[in-house]
Image (spheres, grey):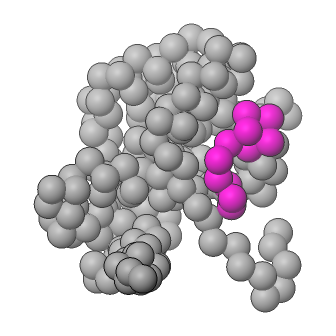
Amino acid sequence: MSLKYSNTTADFLQWDEAMNLIRKLFKDGDYNMSLLIALGCFFGLRISDILSLHWNQILNVNEFTIIERKTGKKRTIRINPQLQRHISDCYKSINPIGRNAPILISQKGTVYLVQRINVILKELKKKYRLRIVNFSCHSLRKTFGRQVYNMNSENSELALVKLMELFNHSSVAITKRYLGLRQEELLNTYDCLSF
């Protein structure tokens, strides 16, 4: 829970740091968090949509379709082969009660609460010395957006249009602000000046 009038903007993880975190968590036996961070970074879904996923939707499939909880819009997501292997490895390691089970079950046997995941992410930030200021569930979605933008830097406007569609934003300007690009552009203005 955030304090009244406080700024709770989530930051994004650098892609290589996010991928290293996924690997370290798996190696350390924290399969749930390894999977959560992988899905958040590769799917770009809101946490409410990730928490509603079941194994049969994502295990041994190339793509799946969901109705986003916040917007009510249909979204189809493709799962790349590397992520498919990771999902399969997590499934074997977690050994859930079945393929129809939710993917992220806590030790209490219930689906994680968003607040609990945010606490865990702050603990992971400290434990793994992550270089991110504000680390929360929403950081994963922003990490996805930033990576898509960075990978398409030769045609950044097209990348922004794609992300606008994926995120269901009403304009490219909102997507730029969401990714922190607007602020970076403004701050880069000062770097152009010379003495």
Task: Tell me which residue sits at (73%, 39%) in the image.
Answer: 129
| In-front residue for pair 65/14 | 14
Q: Determine which quarter of the picture holds residue 74.
A: bottom left
Q: Where the N terminus falls, by quadrant?
A: bottom right
Quarter holding residue 170:
bottom left
Q: Which residues are magenta?
A: 124-135
Give the camera-side residue of 162 and 11.
11
Instruction: Classify 187 as above or below 79.
Output: below
Left or right of 113 in this view: 192:
left
Residue at image location 30% in from the left, 22% down from the top: 81
Q: Is residue 12 left or right of residue 118?
A: left
Q: Residue at x 25, y 67 (%)?
A: 160
For the C terminus, which image quadrant?
bottom left
Q: Nearer the viewer, residue 188 or 37?
A: 188
Residue reaching furthest front? 195
Q: Position of residue 13 (x, y in %)?
A: 54, 49
Which image quadrant is residue 191 in?
bottom left
Q: Is residue 8 above or below residue 100?
A: below
Q: Position of residue 142 (x, y in %)?
A: 48, 58
